[in-house]
Amino acid sequence: MNNQNHSSGRSTADFRLKILQHIFARPFLAAIIVGSLIHFGKWLNLYIHNKDYNTNLTQLLENGTAFAMADILMPFFIPFIVISISRKLAKIKECEFLNNFPDANPDLVVKCNAKGEPIFINNTVKALLFELNILAREMNRLVPDQLHQINIDTLALPTQITHTIQHITIEYLVNKSNNNGFFLSGRKKIEK
């Protein structure tokens, strides 16, 4: 019985979290809700102090239209701006993480253009080049010859290619890249 209540509480909390995520994923919706809550709080404060919200609004309009408009719209505008900026910053941070991901990958990662020439290698590949005493300008030696035989237009599924360089055998998985090139991800094959 207690376990059932605990899981029910968790599902309720998950549901509430999903609602909040849904609301705050849309800056305009969040601004309307937050601004309305701020205006409700103002109304409640005036009500508690026995003042009329409409009278207060009329006084603001008499003091100046710009001031009244700022007082009315600011509770909507500020949440919209804050949420929009935070979403933009989150996207930038996610892009930075994704851009650093290939370098942090322990697999060999090589991105090639449509001609099969390497245009990016990660740190693991650089370490392998150093281990094999291959200069950076000779990194084409890491690309299997079979890569040139693959028709990039018909490559739908990842294709596995084995490539041997000096004494090391590398098993590559070849995928189509979004720039009409190839994306190779590989590991050294361990001899048994």
Image (cartoon, grey):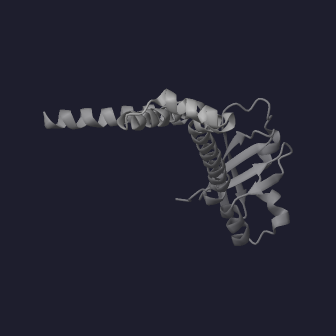
Front one among 144 and 53: 53
Which residue is drawn at the image coordinates 43% and 36% (left, top)? Answer: 41
Front one among 25 and 124: 25
| Residue 3 in picture, x, y percent from top left | 18, 37
The answer to whether 86 is drawn above or below residue 151 in the figure is below
**Residue 170 visible in the shown view:** no
Which residue is drawn at the image coordinates 77% and 55% (left, top)? Answer: 120
The answer to whether 113 is drawn above or below residue 153 in the figure is below
For the view shown, which residue lies furthest in the left direction?
Answer: 1
**Residue 59 visible in the shown view:** yes
Which residue is drawn at the image coordinates 38% and 33% (left, top)? Answer: 47
| Residue 31 in picture, x, y percent from top left | 56, 34
Is 71 situated left or right of 148 in this image? left
For the view shown, which residue lies furthest in the top direction?
Answer: 54
| Residue 57 in picture, x, y percent from top left | 55, 31
Say how many tags the image has: 0
Q: Quadrant of the N terminus?
A: top left
Which residue is drawn at the image coordinates 48% and 37% (left, top)? Answer: 38
Q: Quadrant of residue 63?
A: top right
| Residue 35 in picture, x, y percent from top left | 53, 34
Is 91 situated left or right of 41 in this image? right
Front one among 99 and 110: 99
Front one among 19 and 79: 79
